[in-house]
Image (tube, grey):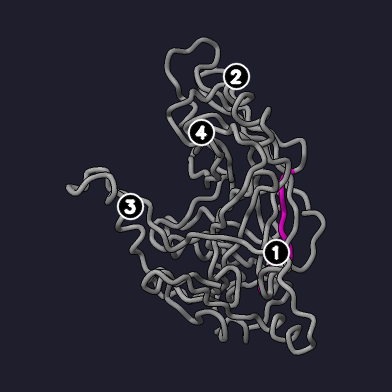
Amino acid sequence: MAFLDNSGDIILDAVLTDTGRRRMAKGNFRISKFAIGDDEIDYGLYNKEHPSGSAYYDLEILQTPVLEAFTQMNANINYGLTSYARQDLLYIPTIELNQKTFNSRIVLKSTTKNVIYLADDTKTNTAGVVTSAAMATAGGSETNILKSSDTSGRFVLIETGINSTDLTSDSTNQSAYITSVGLADNSFLVRYDNRFIGSAIGPSPSSTFSNSNANGATLEVSLVSSQNTRKSRELSNYNETTVNASLSRVYALVDGSSTDTSTNYSAITGPRGVFTALNFNIVSNLPQSDYTKYGTTSNDLFADGTLFDFIDTTIYVQGVATNATIQLPIRIIKLAQT
């Protein structure tokens, strides 16, 4: 459903999903809840230097066109608005993808494609070389990739916290602004397209991310199967599952140091909340027809003559306490059939 500004009149453009139309036909359609989003709005358009004065600061925002309604939640609201019961919250945690290089197990986005590669190593070429090894040879720099079903290798590292330099990232502020006000997620909800992803793998409760001095941070992660997998009620063809989260203990100015080096390890500049780590299992024996229908086949992806098939998909990760959400652009990749 979308709100359309039509010369002062309030107009709601509502489009029913297939489920909604079916229930309306049966006579039992009833709206019981709704979500609000502002994905179309660019708040950077707020102009405090407008020559006409304060009444015009938000003029460009108010004149922003609003998209028509779509039938899927993920097509219309990617970052929903959230309500909190407490009225005294000064800062709300954000969620960030950690792209630091201090630990070789942290997967980085491709610098050229802006995706996270998920390799299917059950596929080999005629010489018996698996997909990830072929990518390392063909792509050169494209060696920092996820390997499907690998519980001891690389993972996606995600953090929450207050991404602001207003507050020092110490344990006192972590307690005051995150843990004591109920903004430390104890788990994350992971949504993935069940046509391509079979399941998610998350960190064990014993996983840790900490520093004890200014010379480095320790990231210890063991991956285990996710919990409570079920069909998503909001996203077509998606499953959702729960993975663990652990409190980050990466702090600034540890052991009396005068220089904050913690941002060399954490993606959060202010007080840190929690972290999680993810890998995924590609659907077993994902058919070639799916690569043809939903993806790209026989692509010389790295311009060296090695051909790959791939499917792009999006994974959504949401904190259960903060509702902070991040989208992970995943490229499922395998050696092309020859």
* Circle 3: element type: loop
Q: Is residue 198 magenta?
A: yes
- Please tell me which of labels 3 and 1 falls first in the chain: 1
Image coordinates for residue 193, horizontal then vertical, percent: 66, 70
Figure quadrant of residue 160: top right
Q: Is residue 28 left or right of residue 111?
A: right
Residue toward you, 24 or 69: 24
| Distance between the alpha carbons at the discs numbered 1 and 2 | 38 Å
Q: Mark 2 — residue?
A: 172
Image coordinates for residue 206, horizontal then vertical, percent: 76, 35
Highlighted magenta segment, given as a residue range: 196-203
- Nearer the observer: mark 4 or 3; the answer is 3
Figure quadrant of residue 42: bottom left
- Please tell me which of labels 2 and 3 falls first in the chain: 3
* Circle 4: element type: loop
- Please tell me which of labels 1 and 2 falls first in the chain: 1
Residue toward you, 304 or 236: 236
Q: Is residue 267 left or right of residue 179?
A: left
**Which residue sits furthest front?**
9
Please name the amino acid that badge 1 sits on: Lys
Tell me the crowding category of disc 1: few under 14, some 14 to 19, or many 20 or more residues within 10 angstroms, Cα based: few
Question: Do the residues bearing badges 4 and 3 touch, measured as CB atoms within 8 Å?
Answer: no
Q: Mark 3 — residue?
A: 58
Q: Mark 4 — residue?
A: 265
Image coordinates for residue 224, horizontal then vertical, percent: 77, 49
**Which residue sits furthest bottom?**
25
| Distance between the alpha carbons at the discs numbered 2 and 4 | 19 Å
